[in-house]
Image (cartoon, rainbow, N blue to C red):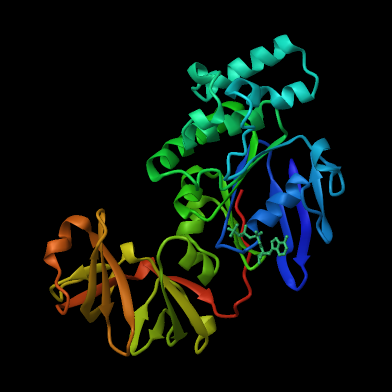
Amino acid sequence: MYLVLKEIRKSFRNVVAVNNVSLEVKKGEWITILGPSGCGKTTLLRIIAGLEQPDSGQLFLEGHDITYVPSRYRNIGLVFQSYALFPNMNVFDNIAFGLRAMKMDEKKVHARVNELLEMIRLKDLAIRFPHQLSGGQQQRVALARAIAPHPRVLLLDEPLSALDAAVRQHLRWELRRIHQVLGITTILVTHDQEEALAVSDRIVIMNHGNIEQIDTPFHVYSAPATPFVASFVGTSNIFKGIIVSKNSILIGEHEIETMFDLSQKLGEEIIAIIRPEDIKVSKKDNGDEFLFNKIPGIIQTKVFLGAVTRLWIGISDGLVIVADSSGTSAENWKEGENIFVLIPKYALRLLDTVGVPKVTSSP
Ligand SMILES: Nc1ncnc2c1ncn2[C@@H]1O[C@H](COP(=O)(O)OP(=O)(O)OP(=O)(O)O)[C@@H](O)[C@H]1O
């Protein structure tokens, strides 16, 4: 493995920011650390960069223990949310800064900076100063400056969050393209789940200093390992139920059939997760009972979100289920209307209620 974090722990007074985190990153991989504010993402990134010392645990890069190697000897590139360019230097000199600090021959500096200016598509702006650039342009310069000295790892801490939505989307693909061309091992920290799903090879979901799941974007979304992951990545209906037959669970007063064999767990509590987009809503009692659980309900709230129309549906016992219908169907539904909720048996995901986060990983 290229980069290995072994049981890294870091506290600030009585706050455990990072709690025995272990992670293995392959060479050239793009890993995204995703989690809510305060979950320890930045602290973990700062430990990898050498800007923070862990209380315990070890860090290996290319097989070498770098836990106590000072930041400047790690050859790790960093890009932060604030562009942090040198205001008194033009674009060219900003990108050249690290190369000149390494005492690189000036001819080589010119060649490398020009190559990077080409890559970030800012060749025409080389003599501009940071205050003459847009936020997106400044962030591209910060990226070029970070990758100029061929870092062994590129760390990105919310690099796009200060930019408006359109620029953010565009730069996201620029970053991904540059990663594909250069193959730099990259670790991105973000709280933006869409960004994480779009660009990563694997996502690390953190919560309260712990890793809840390490997996591909597809698996994090389709097979969340914990209720936290299910609720943090996308929207989920999360219900507590009891196993009442070999393939069904009782949620409130509704017996819901699943595709699982639950005969070994009869009587146990279980958590059922259902994605809103998997649920169908029908005006008529005509769902295929072989495939669907059919529950009568009343539309409590309808919100048009563009691509989808989100419905909050009361299904008795005080339970509310969220279902997404297509955006074009918005006019079909009325608040207060009686409808049927169709839950496909194959769409239920079940988790134990034990509550201990299970770390799953797939290569
Ligand atoms: N230097 C510090 N002194 C004291 N507490 C700190 C320090 N740095 C971080 N913390 C605390 O450690 C916890 C994790 O902080 P961290 O910045 O790593 O979270 P984060 O997930 O990056 O959050 P955000 O997305 O808001 O930046 C928080 O409770 C934070 O208040």
Q: Position of residue 199 (x, y in %)?
A: 50, 43
Q: Position of residue 221 (x, y in %)?
A: 46, 58
- The quarter of the image holding the N terminus is top right
Q: Is residue 149 left or right of residue 206?
A: right
Q: Along the line of sight, which residue is nearer the eye, 77 or 212?
A: 77
Q: Is residue 32 above or below residue 243?
A: above
Q: Position of residue 298 (x, y in %)?
A: 20, 80
Q: Along the line of sight, which residue is nearer the eye, 300 or 120?
A: 120
Residue occupying the point 33% across, 84% down: 319
Q: Is residue 335 above or below residue 267?
A: above
Q: Along the line of sight, which residue is nearer the eye, 134 or 200?
A: 134
Where on the picture, by quarter, is residue 151?
Answer: top right
Q: Position of residue 187 (x, y in %)?
A: 63, 44
Q: Along the line of sight, which residue is nearer the eye, 71 or 133?
A: 133
- What residue occupies the far top of the structure in this picture? 107
Q: Is residue 132 left or right of residue 280?
A: right
Q: Is residue 243 left or right of residue 190?
A: left
